[in-house]
């Protein structure tokens, strides 16, 4: 490449017999040296950069960056769709079974004494019917009075243990009540409620007490509690969810594989592109050195005087510390030529 640059530059550097001239050139402040370059330098610059761009595009094709990205994006989209399908199936099952229990509050008693205790005590009797096809062992619930959620001391769990037989689990179509036995009991914080809310609770707790079921557990066989395997939603409905979960895991594994292939291709492309960039930088530096015809340092008034130069066309080039550059064509006439160059641009010898 260097020999090509040198050969081409000789054509521009060694013109025919011309008359001598004098150039008085004024430039903006901030330039330590100003160069006059061969007129054809721009053409070679454009050729080198166009060649580098073409080689970079060819590298992208060689490493199949665009193709692998397209495959990665498609695989990622499919993985998201499968994940959404699994999540949708799980949510549908969960919502359906949370609504499958009919809970009826039979009676409520409360001890609410704001002046003497920070906690209120609630006791209630209930009956529940299991309208699902699974054995339900317990529910997690939030108690409320109308639109007021009671601020309880912990999550509340209602276990379905028959008070007479101690058999754990409520089978499909079965009902259970604690009427005639010990009531269910929980506490809530009085201080977290406003006076208006507390008054509403005291007035309505016996008639408007309700519970919102937020979770439940299952078992495959009724028995005593310590002999029962308790299952969460995902385990209890493993067979219904399996196809969705398998499809999600397969799609995620494929997406990960395609992302890895794309990342490897990008890394290889970047490595080769950086090598091309360094090659271009060297070529541009060689071109700049080979193209210099005359050099001057500006005086304190930012003027350069070039004496005894050949009349003809040149490129004025200078670079400041900020990376901006002068790069413009001028014509030096026979005799005295005065010019001012002010337009700044990106350094053309920077890739």
Image: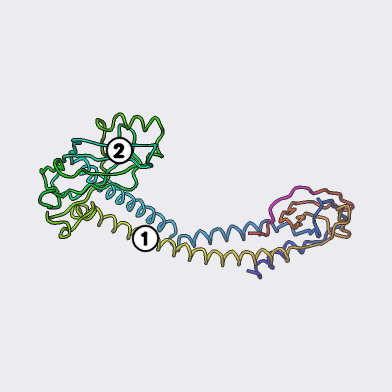
Depth check, front residue: 40 or 223? 223
Identify the mark at residue 111; answer none if there is no mark: 2
Image: magenta residue range: 341-347
The stretch drawn in magenta includes residue 343: yes
Please provide percent x and percent y for residue 34: 80, 58
**Can residue 329 be seen at all in this image of the molecule?**
yes
Depth check, front residue: 292 or 60? 60
List the residue tagged with mark 1: 256
In the displayed structure, does residue 159 sit left or right of residue 116?
left
In the displayed structure, does residue 121 sit left or right of residue 335?
left
Residue 265: quadrant of the picture: bottom left
Task: Identify which residue is drawn at 12% across, 42% down.
Answer: 175
Task: Identify which residue is drawn at 37% across, 60% down.
Answer: 258
Please provide percent x and percent y for residue 33: 81, 60
Q: Secondary structure at mark 1?
A: helix
Please provide percent x and percent y for residue 210: 25, 36
Q: Nearer the viewer, mark 1 or mark 2?
A: 2
Vertical placement of residue 205 versus 306, above or below = above
Q: Residues within 10 Å of mark 1 (few under 14, many from 20)?
A: some
Point out the image quarter for the C terminus.
Answer: bottom right
């Amino acid at each position: 490449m260097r020999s090509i640059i040198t050969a081409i530059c000789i054509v521009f550097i060694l013109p025919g017999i011309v008359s001598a001239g004098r150039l008085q050139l004024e430039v903006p402040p901030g330039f330590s040296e100003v160069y006059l370059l061969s007129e054809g330098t721009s053409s070679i610059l454009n050729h080198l950069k166009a060649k580098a761009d073409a080689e970079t595009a060819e590298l992208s094709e060689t490493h199949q960056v665009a193709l692998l990205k397209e495959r990665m994006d498609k695989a990622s989209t499919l993985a998201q769709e499968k994940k959404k399908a699994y999540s949708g199936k799980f949510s549908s099952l969960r919502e359906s079974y949370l609504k499958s229990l009919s809970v009826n509050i039979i009676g409520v008693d409360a001890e609410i004494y704001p002046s003497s205790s920070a906690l209120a005590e609630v006791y209630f009797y209930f009956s529940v019917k299991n309208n699902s096809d699974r054995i339900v062992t317990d529910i997690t619930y939030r108690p409320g009075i109308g639109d007021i959620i009671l601020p309880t001391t912990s999550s509340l769990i209602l276990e379905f243990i028959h008070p007479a037989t101690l058999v754990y689990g409520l089978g499909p179509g079965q009902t259970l009540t604690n009427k005639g036995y010990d009531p269910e009991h929980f506490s809530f914080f009085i201080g977290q409620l406003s006076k208006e809310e507390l008054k509403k609770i005291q007035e309505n707790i016996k008639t408007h007490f309700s519970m919102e079921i937020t979770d439940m557990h299952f078992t495959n066989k009724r028995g005593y509690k310590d002999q029962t395997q308790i299952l969460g939603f995902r385990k209890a409905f493993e067979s219904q969810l399996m196809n969705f979960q398998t499809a999600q895991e397969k799609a995620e594994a494929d997406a990960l594989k395609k992302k890895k292939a794309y990342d490897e291709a990008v890394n290889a492309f970047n490595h080769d592109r950086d090598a091309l960039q360094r090659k271009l930088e060297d070529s541009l530096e060689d071109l700049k050195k080979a193209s210099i015809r005359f050099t001057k340092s500006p005086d304190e008034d930012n003027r350069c005087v070039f004496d005894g130069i050949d009349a003809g066309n040149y490129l004025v080039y200078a670079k400041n510390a900020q990376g901006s550059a002068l790069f413009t064509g001028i014509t030096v006439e026979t005799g005295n030529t005065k010019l001012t160059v002010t337009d700044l641009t990106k350094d053309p010898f920077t890739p």
